[in-house]
Image (spheres, rainbow, N blue to C red):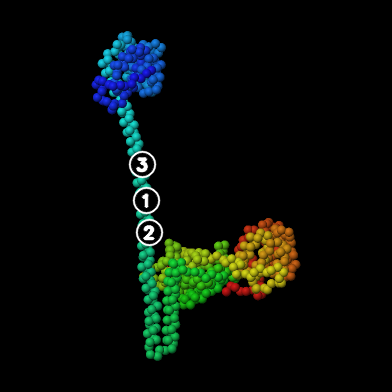
Amino acid sequence: MTTSPTGPHAGSDQGRGDAVQPVNILIVDDEPKNLAVLEVVLDDPGYRLVRASSGDEALLALMADEFALLILDVRMPGMSGFEVAHMVKERRKTARIPIIFLTAYYNEDQHILEGYGTGAVDYLHKPVNPAVLRSKVSMFAELHRQGRALEQANRLLLGEVAERRRAEQRLSELNESLDRRVTERTRDLEASEARLLEASRRKDEFLATLAHELRNPLAPVRNAVELLKRQQPDPAKVQWAADLIDRQVRSFSHLIDDLMDVSRINQGRIELRREIVALNDVLSDAIETVRPMVQECQQDLAVLLPDHTLVVDGDRTRLAQVFTNLLNNASKYTDSGGRIELAVTLERDGVVVTIRDNGIGIPPDRLESVFEMFSQVETAISRSRGGLGIGLSLTQRLVQMHGGIVRAYSDGVGQGSKFQVVLPLARAGDGTRPAEPEAGTEAEEPTGALRLLVVDDNLDAAETLAELLGTMGYEVRQAGDGEAALKVAEKFAPHVVLLDIGLPGMNGYDVCRRMRQQRGGKKRTMVAITGWGQPEDLKRSKEAGFDRHLVKPMDFDALVEILKTVPEPAARRNNAG
Ligand code: ADP
């Protein structure tokens, strides 16, 4: 098989020049001179002729290249032209190649038409008429070119369609994301505009309230001054005027203090003067401040304080301000003759101070916002109860500075309100308890507080329990085993012993028995703290001399209840205030 290079060209196709891509034509004949004739006849720049001198060569060439036309001699030694044609038509890749058979005998015509009647098949008699051959070849070549051009156009079109789809997809994604961003941005803007409007509305209302609040005390002061200016005023009247001015000046100062505090807090300039303070003292300060107002309104103020001292690490003045604000509001927003309650409880999170009133209550949707600056449930115009709307905001900030939280509760308008402040208890050892005695010192000086001894080999458990009890005002010692417990008990003479049973060395039962033998041991309240809670365990601890039996993990409230039942020592400090 050989190919004939395309050389200089003559004839009608010459004008098409380089622009025409040559098409491949396979010419198959066993006679070299026939092939040479075909090459001469089909010499054209539009054709690239590939020669094959047998059926095998022809098939090889067909596998290697793409052809526009196959010109096939019918009679060849070995594989005949028909056989080659059969194989060409059977293979999918070559099935569509048109074939021109070259026949020497007229009786082959019928055969050609029958066998290859369908598809692009033609035949010519040898010797071929050059003009007819050129015309047929040119037609097939043109068909092939058009087919190729069509395929290319099709490919381009498909590519373009896919590209356009991708572009449309990208565009629609971009649009969607733009839409989303516009919606979000609009929502943000609307929200921030609403916030600004609300802040501006509150500020306007605050200014109106402030003007009102500042003018309020002025009228009575002015009247009192007029009275004093009179010639020889009645001494009783002078006293009355002095009291009135004093009261109004106080109210003025309070207002201005609050305003100053707000600005200081906003600039982060308030600093707490922390110390370990007894909560009862703080509450007493607050109660004393509001008592005149409560009395004036003929309200009933019930105070429920714990009978042991709870201590917090805080600024006494600021904490008093917190509770004064809350009590003040309770009185202000409760009608004459109403009731206000203040109660202190010890809970897991810390100490909880609850101030409850049976006053005007708070609508549920305002329970959160009452803590916002300038937020008042009643509008400035309809308000009859004075105030700038900054008290609760200050209260919340001060409580937060103490590591606590404040919450408002109400069942709704007319249902009264409840405010709760939760403060962390001060840690024991923060200056509340005297230092541990050194070993070998003589019996300790009693302080008057109930003395508790905690015995546990788990140091963390002993330590935390001792600290908690210390914050409640008890005198607490601790020991890690039976021997140490007996030694401490000898000097410390505890009123109550909280004794773990599973101790190393001497177990809790034996320690209990021996403690009962000590001086004053019979009167001691012995509490077993153990992981065993079956009836026989209780029986066993009772036999060993325990008064009470608590199962681990210990219910702290149950322990508090037990401690309440222990008779107070004669000289016990009364810290309840
Ligand atoms: P104000 O100076 O208005 O009392 P506060 O910040 O102390 O400002 O309180 C904010 C608002 O919360 C009050 O205006 C009132 O509407 C509501 N509020 C506060 N305490 C109570 C209460 N105990 N009962 C009913 N409403 C209360």
- In primary-sequence order, the first of circles 1 and 3 is 3
- Number of numbered discs present? 3
Q: Nearer the viewer, residue 240 or 469?
A: 469
Is 129 situated left or right of 482 in this image? left
Q: Position of residue 523 (x, y in %)?
A: 71, 69
On screen, 297 above or below 53? below
Per the rendering, the mark at residue 181 is 1
Lower position in the chain sequence, tag 2 or tag 3:
3
The numbered mark, 1 or 2, whose residue comes first in the sequence reads 1
- Judging depth in this view, the residue of 307 and 267 nearest the camera is 267
| Residue topped by disc 3 | 169
Q: CA distance from mark 1 to mark 2?
A: 16 Å
Identify residue type, mark 2: Ser
Q: Check if mark 2's residue and mark 3's residue have beta carbons within 8 Å.
A: no
Front position in the image: 198 or 328? 198
Residue sitting farthest toward the front: 8
Q: Residue at x 32, y 23 (%)?
A: 23
Seen from the viewer's position, the closer of residues 181 and 83 is 83
Label at residue 192 = 2
Quadrant position of residue 470:
bottom right
- Displayed quadrant of residue 532: bottom right
Q: Where in the figure is residue 37, as x and y percent of width and height?
A: 31, 14
